[in-house]
Image (tube, coloured by chain):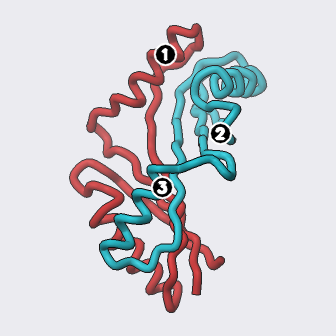
Chain colours: A cyan, B red
Amino acid sequence: MMYRVRIEVSLKQGHSDPEGETAAKSLQELGYPVKATHVSKVYTVYLSADSGSEARRLTDEMCRRLLANPTKDNYSFNIEEG
Amino acid sequence: MMYRVRIEVSLKQGHSDPEGETAAKSLQELGYPVKATHVSKVYTVYLSADSGSEARRLTDEMCRRLLANPTKDNYSFNIEEG
């Protein structure tokens, strides 16, 4: 069965977010009243698995092994069929 | 008033997504049954504005001027107080 997995990876509190800081600075320089900006990444993965629970297990493993760095990143995901 | 704006920027259909392709290839090489992967970016922006409609107007402008490239990107956002 094919699953569509949406994984969001964001930096844990206290970790430096240079891309977010650059975006905030650029927006401020353009005149926008922006206080702060944080950037996170969303992976949409089309994954084949035998069941929803297998898809969840594989997704958690893919996050820990490749898509997120457990030291500095938080991740969350949701899974739907199709 | 302070608003928390969540903006998602993703590539339009047909535009090359090298980061997504690399992620899919790496996951396949690790043995995961992944068919495709797409990557998008989420900006969380803390923005000061007089009203919700002003926050929406500013956000749309920030997307068009800096955060998204209207030629190749889609963007969507939602806004909440706080």
Foreground pick, B5 / A36: A36
Residue A27 drawn above or below residue A15: below
Quarter of the view holding residue B19: top left
- Residue A20 bears which disc, if any? 3
Pointer 3: residues within 10 angstroms few (<14), some, or many (20+)? Answer: some
Tags 3 and 2 touching, CB below 8 Å: no
Q: Position of residue B7 (x, y in %)?
A: 48, 60
User: Same chain for the residues at labels 3 and 2, yes or no?
Assistant: yes
**Cα separation between marks 2 and 1:** 19 Å
Pointer 2: residues within 10 angstroms few (<14), some, or many (20+)? Answer: some
User: Same chain for the residues at labels 1 and 3, yes or no?
Assistant: no
- Residue A73 bears which disc, if any? 2
- Going from N to C along the chain, the mark reached first, 3 or 2, is 3
Q: Residue at x 51, y 12 (%)?
A: B28
**Cα separation between marks 1 and 3:** 26 Å
Q: Residue at x 28, y 33 (%)?
A: B16
- Quick one: quadrant of the C terminus of chain B? bottom right
Circle 3: residue type: Gly
Foreground pick, A52 / A63: A63
Q: Residue at x 58, y 81 (%)?
A: B2
Circle 1: residue type: Ser
Q: Which residue is mark 1?
A: B26
